[in-house]
Amino acid sequence: MPKPQAGRPRTRRDWLWSLGLGHSLGIGHWRLVILLGALALLAGTAPAPARINLVTLPDRASVQLTIYNSADLTLVKETRVLTFKKGLNRLEFSWANTLIDPTSLEFRALTHADAVELLDASFPPRVVNTLEWRIHSEFAGEVQVEIRYFTSGISWSADYVAESEKTEKAMALAGYVRVNNNSGEDYENAQVRLVVGVIRLVDEIVKLAQAGRPGAVPPPTAPAAAPAPAKALRAFGGALAVAEEKAKAAEIVKEELSEYFLYTVEGRDTIPTGWSRRLPSFKAPGVPITSYYKFEKERWGDQVVRYYRFTNSVASKLGKEPLPDGSVKAFRVVSDDTLYSFVGRTSVKYIPANETVELELGNDREVLVKPTLMNWVKTDIAFDGNGNVKGWTVKETWEIEMQNSKDIDVVLDIRRNFSGDWSMTTDARYEKVDANKVKFLVPLKAREKQRFTYEVTTRLGTNATR
């Protein structure tokens, strides 16, 4: 705000400037209402009975966002340094065009707490989306205060990048979190904390924010995330500003809190409304994995599906905390100069500590499984007293041909499903999965072909052998 100029009538703004009260102190939703009875007398007018002399509050000294991924809920905690006069002060908060829940607003003094007392909170008449606190201070000067409230429209999600070694015996697993802000409010230089766990609310915060108070104009619903400027991500493309561009990558500190886990992102970041930020969470090299290939005609037809399996444990070079659900992109080193090939993508559910997880990465055309029915015989036909067939036995002979066209060894997990009263004979090793399914685990060397056969006998109805 410019200083008063000479040669023109002095306005109330000039009086504020001369008393050191008229300078601009920042931007935001906060405004301080100072009772200036003495100033009104100097101007030759009586003090106004209502809201007078609004001065913009200073910028936030700090802001912390605690974002829950199980509900549309974020706890905002911000601090500001305010200059109070001795006596009555009025502090005004406006949440227009945001998704802030006004019923959750809390105020407290962090410094000179014994001299600052919150008297009451009220909604000024004919002013929508605004709350006013009356604060009595026995101290004149700067006071650090904390404001807490809930908002909706801020969310986070996790994603992972798996980079397998050429032999597919180990991988580097990197985790990231993406924070999306559609709350209507910009949060500058914010510390971000992420909560993994399920909470239950009587009312959804977004509904409380949109309802406001009687007569208030509801804010718009949270819009879809606006596209951010495109920036290249290290392993794959994306359109988000990434924190890994910083000289020092942000560390995410994990803490166990009863049934929740709290992830605190190191450092601070600015998240304007309508924007997203992608922050690195962790990177664990040398995580042991088992690479294997599944074939099950009833699930995938003639396709062979690749899997990576690993355990979320300290022994596997991961942490003690759970991993939140998210998407996974997998790559594999295919040359000595670390050229990567894309393996596949999938999604994972919440992974508790010490739990083993399978990543289904899609069809692999370099591994072939071909089952062929070689023989089929119906025997032991039985009839009832009316000459109708009441039972029979079917014997089937199958050949399973397998081919590995890859330059590494693989393990095949071949599942076969049967029905009825069945039994099987084979020279191949197998194990029962359940009452109607078996699996064959077959290791194949690079460029190797193999085959095996089995005979399954199925007894149907009431046949002559019973």
Image: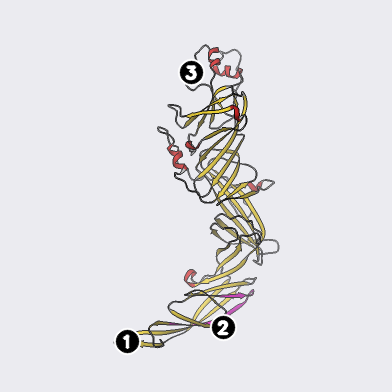
- Give the residue number, with chain letter if any, for mark 1: 384
Q: Are marks 2 and 3 in contact (CB under 8 Å)?
A: no
Label 3 crowding class (10 Å Cα cut-off): few <14, some 14-19, many 20+? few
- Give the residue number, with chain letter if any, for mark 2: 427
Q: Calculate the distance from the C-alpha at mark 2 to the C-alpha at mark 3.
A: 99 Å
Please name whichever residue, 94 or 258, is drawn nearer the observer in this view of the structure: 258
| Residue 283 makes an appearance in the image | yes
| Left or right for 71, reference 162 | left
- What residue is drawn where x is 59% and y is 76%? 442
| Residue 82 makes an appearance in the image | no
Element under label 1? Answer: loop
Per the image, is 155 magenta? no
Is residue 242 placed above or below 299 in the rendered structure?
above
Type of residue at label 3?
A: Ala
Q: Position of residue 133 (x, y in %)?
A: 51, 28
- Give the residue number, with chain letter if any, for mark 3: 48
For marks 2 and 3 on the same chain, the one whose residue lies earlier in the sequence: 3
Q: Start and end of the magenta stretch? A: 439-458
